[in-house]
Amino acid sequence: MSADLKRRKFIKGASLAGLAGLGGLALATGTAAQTAGSDVTLRGTGDLGVIIERADGSVLIVDTTRRTVIWRVEGLGDLSHASAVFSRDARYVFVFGRDGGLTKVDILEGRIAKRIIQGGNSIGGAISQDGALVAVSNYEPGGVKIFDAETLDLVADIPATWGPDGARSKTVGLTDAPGGRFVFSLYDAGEIWVVTMTSGTPEIEKFPHAGALPYDGLITPDGRYYMAGLFGEDGMAMLDLWQTEKGLTRILPDYGRGEEKLPVYKMPHLEGWAAAGDKLFVPGVGRHHVVIIDRTTFAEVGRIPVHGQPVFVMARPDGRHVWVNFALPNNDTVQVIDVLTSQIIHTMKPGKAVLHMEFSPRGEEVWVSVRDENVVRVYDTATFEEISTLPAKAPSGIFFTARAGKTGL
Amino acid sequence: MSADLKRRKFIKGASLAGLAGLGGLALATGTAAQTAGSDVTLRGTGDLGVIIERADGSVLIVDTTRRTVIWRVEGLGDLSHASAVFSRDARYVFVFGRDGGLTKVDILEGRIAKRIIQGGNSIGGAISQDGALVAVSNYEPGGVKIFDAETLDLVADIPATWGPDGARSKTVGLTDAPGGRFVFSLYDAGEIWVVTMTSGTPEIEKFPHAGALPYDGLITPDGRYYMAGLFGEDGMAMLDLWQTEKGLTRILPDYGRGEEKLPVYKMPHLEGWAAAGDKLFVPGVGRHHVVIIDRTTFAEVGRIPVHGQPVFVMARPDGRHVWVNFALPNNDTVQVIDVLTSQIIHTMKPGKAVLHMEFSPRGEEVWVSVRDENVVRVYDTATFEEISTLPAKAPSGIFFTARAGKTGL
């Protein structure tokens, strides 16, 4: 199938209800745009978004104002666990596939602008503060590769070598940081590396002894603190990027699977930490609670019992509410916590396999992907009313263009 | 001059050096785009911005990635003290002029999409959380008008009447807030009003006894706390929008002009409060210092001596540095404070009449308008090196499209 035929624009107002079950078939309703530029509308990109259709290697480009699908773009490879970041101008989305694919999609024209296979097995990426560089974190071969955001030409290859025998470590928890930096963790090596790219070539600062098997990382919204969760022991490693000379500190000694090694159905995403007011809300690993952490001292100050093992714990952009989804067997449910009272104020069942949630930039709506129902549901965050439903094939991650202006997203 | 002739696109790569001194003359270099849609480029709008040219009633549309001027749009009336907000899709900018003009500019096509005179003397505006409504704050006749963002049709007229004789108050400090709300202060009445628009008609909650002559207001970045500065007495009025039933509280009893009524060359903009980490950095009124406030208790915790009377005190998006400009006779200077040490780490002199500063969304650059030099200077915020200079006619406010996704901007 040619690239042009893979680009299909939905007819405005056409019923999309029949789409959900089509699987890998070409789209029945919709017109094929034959040439680049045709059917393309002059429009702002501030209210667009991307939904990953994980089973089909496709993405939907959506209009979050009209709550409609504009394009389906196919041919992105294995999108299980895929994530995405946006170009500085919010015209392109870079999609990181599990198969090592890095795909640059033009969201205005609804087509693949460029696609490369940059590694064997990758696990996420980031875009530099100035938008000029895209970095990808690889399991195989272990390391980070950095590409020109315009051309996808390789700019730097950073193998995650460690120890006396020069073995390579899987890399995880890759994020951008202020100062033209990227930060990531070495799973096998138990290290955190900070790479500064302002000179054009990587300057690497290595922080060993981060702990056993860091499996994911996150950066606070201001870009100051990088934290890595540990699979091999309890506690987390933290690096203050304002004062890297102070080295790593260990926080939350009780955070993790615990001595009894609880069964964990899904390691919670650390991206899903919620900063709300002077507190952080964090998924308890393998436990049915959300942990409350003081944002200044990073000490645990409370726990909120919830419906299952939390996966994403996400603050509404104004920080008043925190939305939580769960691992199997409770992944049909979403709960909402009021930050002022630490009480659950709402429980809803969007359907089987709620995988991700994305708030509109100023928080009036949330889009929820329900994989096994083949829908994305849109809720009013004030009333919890369902406003709209969009068909999508096994949807997982949802990413809105406002991320382009934010650190760590 | 027809609307079409008022729309001019700059030739890419053409020298702009000669533009600065042209005053009201038609632009010498540049081509007139004769019809809507011609010369218009399909592009993302995530990296665009608007610069107010206050003396000429024009705005420049700029590309912040290439650091170039794309369009000059003329015919916006009196733009002294003008401000601007962006549409949800980041395609349009709404410019609030001092003469009561509300102009909707299409930044992709570089033309006025719609312009109305909505009041006699206005002082800023806001766009609702969902992007559907634009509100304008008026001195004359005192009150707030709310318009459909699409059509600029009047949706609600809220006269700021108060007291037994039904006099109307000037309104100031208008901002959007989560929950589909607008918040503003009544200068003459000393009240704060919260207007909820979710039902389509205004529901007004009034908070009297805010203090003498509130002259401006701001909302914290999370949209929780609204604060009004007082011209008639010291201290500030604060409203917790999460708990409006608790009413107004008074904070910062020593904040203001003081008993001796210091000469104040320019009342500091409260928009220019900087939230960085667990602190707020606030311009001292009429004093040569920046006040540090604890973000939780709202108590003053320190003062930093600076070069003059601060006007804007703005945090770099990562919160590590705070940039400060000053009132006459020190308005040729900018100082940078390191938040970690509370020390001034850099002093620069961009030129006569530094009026405004705008950071790129992730903070790697700052654009500084220097009115009397007819330039906007772009600085690298890490090295303080000047990267670029753009000619502009008496530039004042600078507004980048990333504001579209933020509360209170």
Image: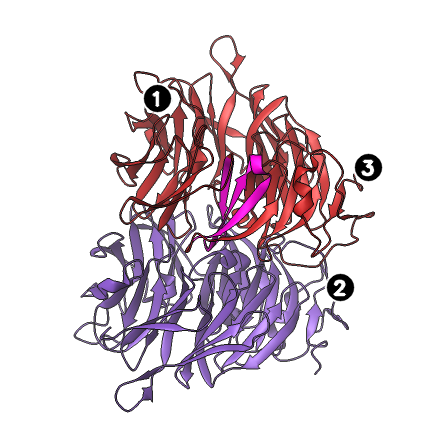
Chain colours: A purple, B red
**Residue type at the position of mark 3:** Ser
Instruction: Please give the residue where the numbered disc 1 appears in the rendered image.
Output: B257
Secondary structure at numbered mark 2: loop
Find residue A204 and report its image quarter: bottom left
Please state if B258 lies on the left or on the right of B365 as rendered.
left
Tell me if residue B365 is in the magenta stretch: yes
Q: Tell me the SS state at disc 3.
A: loop
- Count neighbours of disc 1 (C-alpha within 10 A) and say few if under 14, some if 14 to 19, many if 20 or more: many
Of badges 1 and 2, nearer the viewer stands 1
Please say whether residue B103 is visible from this viewpoint.
yes
The answer to which image quadrant residue A69 occupies is bottom right
Which residues lie in the magenta part?
B354-381
Residue A397 image offset from top left, x and y in percent: 49, 67
| Residue A39: mark | 2
As measured in the structure, the alpha-carbon distance from the residue carrying label 3 to the one carrying label 2 is: 31 Å
- Label 3, residues with CA under 10 Å away: few <14, some 14-19, many ≥20: few
Residue, disc 3? B2
Task: Label 1: state its secondary structure.
Answer: loop
Q: What main secondary structure does the magenta stretch of the protein show? A: strand
Q: Furthest-left residue in view?
A: A259
The verdict on a common chain for dots 3 and 2 is no
The chain identifier of the residue carrying mark 1 reads: B
